[in-house]
Amino acid sequence: NAGVTQTPKFQVLKTGQSMTLQCAQDMNHEYMSWYRQDPGMGLRLIHYSVGAGITDQGEVPNGYNVSRSTTEDFPLRLLSAAPSQTSVYFCASRLLGQGATGELFFGEGSRLTVL
Amino acid sequence: GNSVTQMEGPVTLSEEAFLTINCTYTATGYPSLFWYVQYPGEGLQLLLKATKADDKGSNKGFEATYRKETTSFHLEKGSVQVSDSAVYFCALSSPSGTYKYIFGTGTRLKVLA
């Protein structure tokens, strides 16, 4: 009963370092997305994908890269980490098409600190 | 553009008190509306939803009615429990097919025994 799995759960980076947050889902969801959660700002969409090979930008895409080579995986890459990217990151997925309820399924989050 | 505004917290209630968390939205067309709940150390999970005007979503004693005339989707529960302590997020999904969800800033609820 895995659902949406994110790794790592915690990470500390130095400014300028790069890293990848991993997200995998086993529900055969076409749609996957990344959000960041900051105090007083709720969740803001970074990037999303509606299928393998298809990605698009959300509200706050700068400094982040994504790719979608398989239905299951949607990694988020930080190319050169900045302190402003200190946040909690959530991956979420959902079914599309007929019968879909619109419900987003979330991972448990990845807490990133950039020093 | 689309937006969601929900009341700021934290909200502190005694057990068995009545809960209302206000949520209003701005959107073109007819969005779907959601309430998500986030328990400490966990991701968000769907609490309830409504997809059209006058729909009432309900789950675990919580209710919310999609009011198009007031562009609101207030969350209510008649008698809260300590286990309801969490952060509650109101959200909408754009009806335009762009698959973008807009979340409110979240309201922290603390229920005291």
Image (tube, coloured by chain):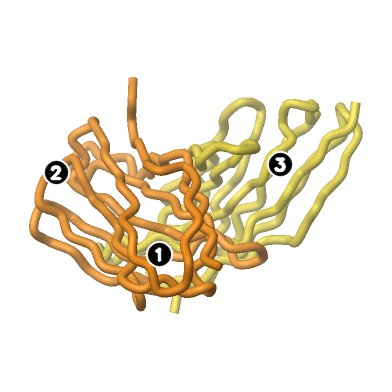
Chain colours: A orange, B yellow
- Label 1 close to label 3 by CB (< 8 Å): no
* Above or below: residue B39 compared with residue B94: above
Query: Which residue is labeled 3 in the image?
Result: B76
- Of circles 1 and 3, the one toward us is 1
Q: How crowded is mark 1: few (under 14 residues within 10 Å), some or many (20 or more)?
A: many
User: Can marks 1 and 3 be said to lie on one chain?
Assistant: no
- Of circles 3 and 2, the one toward us is 2
Residue at position x 31%, y 71% in the image? A79
Disc on res. A45? 1
Residue B95 visible in rendering: no
- In the rendering, at what x and y percent does residue B47 appear? 54, 37
* Above or below: residue B98 compared with residue B91: below
Q: Earlier in the sequence, mark 2 or mark 1?
A: 1
Give me the C-alpha separation between circle 3 and circle 2: 37 Å
Residue B35 visible in rendering: yes
Give me the C-alpha separation between circle 2 and circle 1: 19 Å
Query: Which residue is labeled 2 in the image?
Result: A71
User: Can marks 3 and 2 be said to lie on one chain?
Assistant: no
Amino acid on which the number 3 mark rests in the picture? Glu
The image quadrant where one finds the N terminus of chain A is top left
